[in-house]
Image: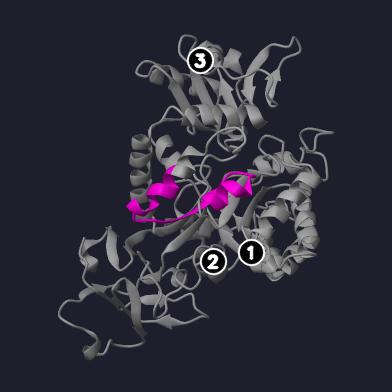
């Protein structure tokens, strides 16, 4: 790649720095060195500067995805994709086709809310389509695994773990959640080598940069507990993350603070489940699921265990990412943080709640007082928020209370964002689109607020605001050039916006339009 300093001119540069805008930007040694309005003065330009004519396009800081998996996502890229399936028969056709060329079938992205049957398939259904090779399927939210009969024998999971479902006769259904799902996930990861991890991380880095993502919070092996298995993907990234062009901030998936501290990490959790998902009806609600009377999900950790973990992290100044979706899980987190705040400076630690889809107005106010950051996924509304979608199926009269960006922001809570891929697509512009075009209009954010979720707020959520997230003198030259002026784009067309160029540390690492240079 060309390593010369860069001059970006004729741009609509949104600095994400107190409303500041510029027409041109100069980089030097991987940093932003100058910005200005009008024409760049000649004395700032040497013969070694590479000029990029933005031609009125929007220029932004590189996007920051705060809920990401690098290795895991790369490994999935070559596996079986079941997202096109709309019923069991279509799913079965895909499995049969793949069984003809694979000895073991590992599949992803099966969403029960998109299936005509409105339920995940059990082993008997899977056996109809593939009875002679192991089949393992992850649900879209990756909180549930389905195995056919051969798969149950192949993976040899202990039958005593919580989360193993049986029928009325005590026979395994082939559907696994909770600790059983965690163990199976670890078993799958153990089949890969560090060379596989390296190829996966390199692939996903390249793909992420093509969508303008320059920094990620890596939450590898979601749900795996250190007490159960080594965190191989996270350990790999601790050792080798500097190989890749992305900036990778690692969240260690353990409740053992010592493990994270030994690795020299600043973040813990991020995908440590406080509850489950709405898709699986395991998110902890204060009311019944509309399509499952008397069912409200559950909080996975006891109050004492959660408070003890929170206290220990605060004692060691570790930032916690709590994975909580339902209002009762969020309540458990806030109570633990309020207990910790009696002894520690909790706001200074910028603890986070990941997802927080059903946070209530009173909880928003408490989160703001505690300095809690919400890491949210606007793309969920594109998947499940439309009328008749999974959110409405599960919530009934409570439909419209998910991802209330407008009220959350107005409550003074800092919101950052992430795709949570592959649940939603890597592309941050899709998240920006759905933050602005929430299916319930009263919940929508402004374009400026949506951009802040993926830039300046994203940096703040990782303690990187002095380096990234905005464009000003001395900041890292992580820069994205879009294919148009996003401020003049019809809000309904935001999802059509594309990244034309990505610059990382002052170097062009992705260029869709050679005419820019």
First in sequence: mark 3 vs mark 2:
3
Residue 25 x, y percent position in the rendering: 33, 79
Query: Is 335 placed above or below 114 here?
Result: below
Residue drawn at the location 55% of the way across and 64% of the way down: 453
Residue to which mark 2 is pinned = 463
Decide if residue 80 is on the left or right side of residue 295. Answer: left
Residue 432 x, y percent position in the rendering: 52, 60
Residue 329 x, y percent position in the rendering: 75, 47
Disc 1 + disc 3, Cβ < 8 Å: no
Instruction: Using the numbered discs, state the Cα–Cα distance from disc 2 to disc 1 in whole angstroms.
Output: 8 Å
How crowded pointer 1 is (Cα within 10 Å; few <14, some 14-19, many 20+) is rated as many
Q: Which segment did they paint magenta?
A: 236-262
- Checking the image for residue 350, the label placed there is 1
Decide if residue 240 is on the left or right side of residue 421. Answer: left
Q: Secondary structure at mark 2?
A: loop
- Checking the image for residue 154, the label placed there is 3
């Amino acid at each position: 790649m060309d390593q010369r300093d860069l001059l970006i001119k004729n741009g609509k540069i949104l600095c994400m720095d107190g409303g500041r805008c510029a027409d041109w930007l100069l980089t030097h040694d991987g940093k932003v060195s100058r910005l200005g309005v009008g024409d760049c003065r000649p004395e700032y330009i040497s013969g070694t500067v590479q000029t990029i004519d933005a031609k009125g396009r929007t220029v932004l800081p590189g996007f920051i995805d705060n809920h990401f998996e690098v290795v895991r996502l790369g490994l999935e890229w070559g596996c079986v994709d079941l997202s096109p399936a709309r019923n069991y028969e279509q799913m079965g056709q895909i499995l049969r086709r793949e069984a003809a060329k694979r000895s073991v079938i590992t599949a992803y992205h099966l969403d029960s809310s998109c299936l005509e049957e409105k339920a995940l398939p059990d082993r008997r259904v899977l056996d109809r389509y593939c009875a002679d090779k192991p089949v393992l399927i992850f649900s879209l939210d990756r909180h549930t695994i389905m195995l056919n009969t051969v798969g149950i024998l192949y993976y040899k999971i202990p039958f005593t773990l919580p989360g193993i479902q049986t029928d009325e006769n005590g026979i395994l259904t082939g559907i696994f959640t909770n600790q059983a799902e965690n163990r199976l996930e670890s078993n799958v990861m153990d089949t890969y080598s560090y060379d596989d991890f390296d190829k996966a991380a390199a692939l996903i880095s390249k793909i992420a940069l093509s969508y303008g993502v320059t920094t990620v919070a890596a939450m590898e092996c979601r749900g795996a507990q250190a007490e159960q298995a080594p965190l191989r993907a996270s350990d790999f990234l601790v050792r080798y993350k500097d190989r890749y062009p992305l900036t990778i901030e690692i969240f260690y998936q353990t409740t053992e603070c010592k493990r994270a501290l030994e690795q020299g990490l600043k973040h813990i959790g991020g995908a440590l489940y406080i509850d489950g998902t709405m898709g699986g009806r395991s998110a902890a609600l204060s009311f019944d699921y509309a399509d499952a009377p008397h069912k409200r999900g559950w909080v996975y950790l006891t109050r004492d265990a959660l408070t003890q973990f929170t206290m220990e992290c605060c004692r060691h100044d570790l930032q916690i990412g709590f994975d909580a979706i339902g209002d009762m899980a969020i309540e458990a987190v806030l109570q633990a943080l309020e207990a910790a705040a009696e002894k520690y400076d909790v706001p200074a630690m910028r603890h986070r709640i990941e997802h927080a889809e059903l946070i209530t107005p009173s909880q928003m106010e408490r989160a703001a007082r505690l300095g809690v950051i919400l890491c949210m996924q606007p793309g969920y509304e594109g998947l499940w928020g439309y009328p008749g979608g999974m959110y409405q199926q599960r919530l009934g009269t409570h439909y419209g209370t998910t991802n209330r960006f407008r009220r959350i922001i107005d409550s003074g809570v800092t919101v950052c964002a992430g795709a949570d891929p592959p649940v939603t697509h890597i592309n941050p512009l899709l998240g920006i689109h759905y933050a602005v075009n929430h299916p319930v209009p009263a919940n929508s954010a402004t374009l400026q607020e949506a951009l802040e979720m993926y830039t300046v707020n994203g940096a703040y959520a990782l303690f990187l605001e002095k380096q990234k997230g905005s464009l000003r003198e001395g900041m890292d030259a992580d820069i994205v050039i879009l294919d148009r002026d996003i401020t003049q784009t019809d809000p309904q067309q935001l999802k059509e916006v594309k990244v034309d160029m990505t610059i990382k540390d002052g170097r062009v690492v992705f260029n869709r339009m050679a005419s820019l240079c």
